[in-house]
Image: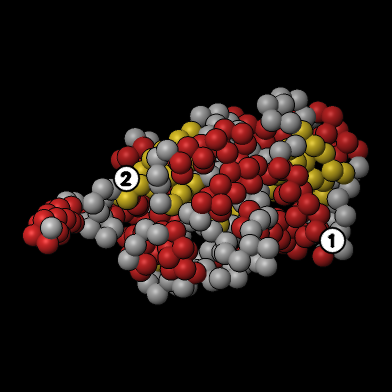
Amino acid sequence: MKLQHLILIACWSAWSLCASAQPAGPIRIGVSGPFTGGSSPMGLSMRDGIRVAAAEINAAGGLLGRPVQLVERDDEARNERGAKIAQELIGKEKIVAGVGIVNTGVALASQRYYQEARIPMITAVATGSIVTRQFLPPQHPENFIFRVSANDTIQAAMIVEEAIVRRKFRKVAILADSTNYGQLGREDLERALEKMGVRPVTVGKFNIRDVDMTRQLLAARKAGAEALLTYGIGPELAQIANGVARLGWQVPIIGSWPLSMSNFIDSAGPNGEGARMPQTFIQEANTPKRQAFIEAWQKRARMERMPSPSAAAQGYDAMLLLAAAIRQAGTTFGSRVREALEELDEKVEGVIMTYERPFSRQDHEAFDNVSQVVMGQVRSGRVVRAHEGNRPKPPR
């Protein structure tokens, strides 16, 4: 019996050595977003930004000696599909972390599954101010939801500053879509206006796929609106710009960042000229880092103009931050990666800015104030800077 026991131990030890010598599988990262439909310019731009970052990571040897593998899913900007995809990525695909999500409603519907599974999720686009606040202490001792985008509290403050402070308008109308994104953004706009002592002359609402905004625009014009403040996505925003033109009404449009989407710019055409919106990234190769990123993105996406430059850059930077956290943690175990994200030692050079301790236990927002964001403007079919001098410190 003693000899048999020793033989069993020896066999087990040999098997363990052989097993440990086998190469570990890839590190699987979930990527979800709208790759079809009206929100797809943001989703596709983000996805290709993430792909560029993952390719760079793998070219440098991967993470923890293992390649990164992206597991991508199209959520179609539908809340219920986003929730189903989150469950699939976690339960079936065995991802260790997630990056992505474009629409605020999808984020709110799906990220609870990452929280329950204790898997870090870095939202790379969705901007609803509540996104990173769903799981705060004391009710939730640990929050697994992070974000690399300018939330709507920041954007609303910039929109109002542009309209009220810079351009001296006192009568503004709000037009927001009926989604979670639009209505939460409207609330942020109203709070930002209230701080300036201003109330909107009208507040209009429209639905996704609406093609006639005449009623809302006539109400705003009748109330004496000097500017339109918008919260929506590209196709419907284009209907607003085109509706303004049909009425022969010259009124500026200042809104949240989807005014930079290609399907707004292309569908509005000359009617979209001059529209202004907050941007974390403008497609300009003004540093070697940004030039390399833009060229890599163009090669991968096979197009010259980014349909949503901010989404592309945020996806790229979010992936780099996740990689830095996994390296620091020395493991893909969710709680350890979350802790590393909250206490990152490494400075991470993204294309938007260089990140130094972007998160903390109390603050899971990589962007904390308006100084990290610029105001963009549509000009000749592209987004350019509306003002000089208000830009994040560029990476080298």
Residue density around tag 2, few if under 14, some if 14–19, many if 20 or more, within 10 Å: some
Closer to the camera, 168 or 7? Answer: 7
**In the image, is 396 to the left or to the right of 315?**
left
Cα separation, mark 2 vs mark 1, equals: 47 Å
Closer to the camera, 311 or 67? Answer: 67
Quickly name the residue at label 1: 194
Q: Quadrant of the C terminus?
A: bottom left
Q: Are marks 2 and 1 in contact (CB under 8 Å)?
A: no
Quickly name the residue at label 2: 69
The correct choice, above or below, for 322 with respect to 237 in the image is below
Residue 137: x %, y % from top left: 65, 66
The correct choice, above or below, for 180 with respect to 78 in the image is below
Residue occupying the point 78% across, 52% down = 187
Residue occupying the point 51% across, 51% down = 117
Residue 81: x %, y % from top left: 57, 33
Q: Secondary structure at mark 2?
A: strand
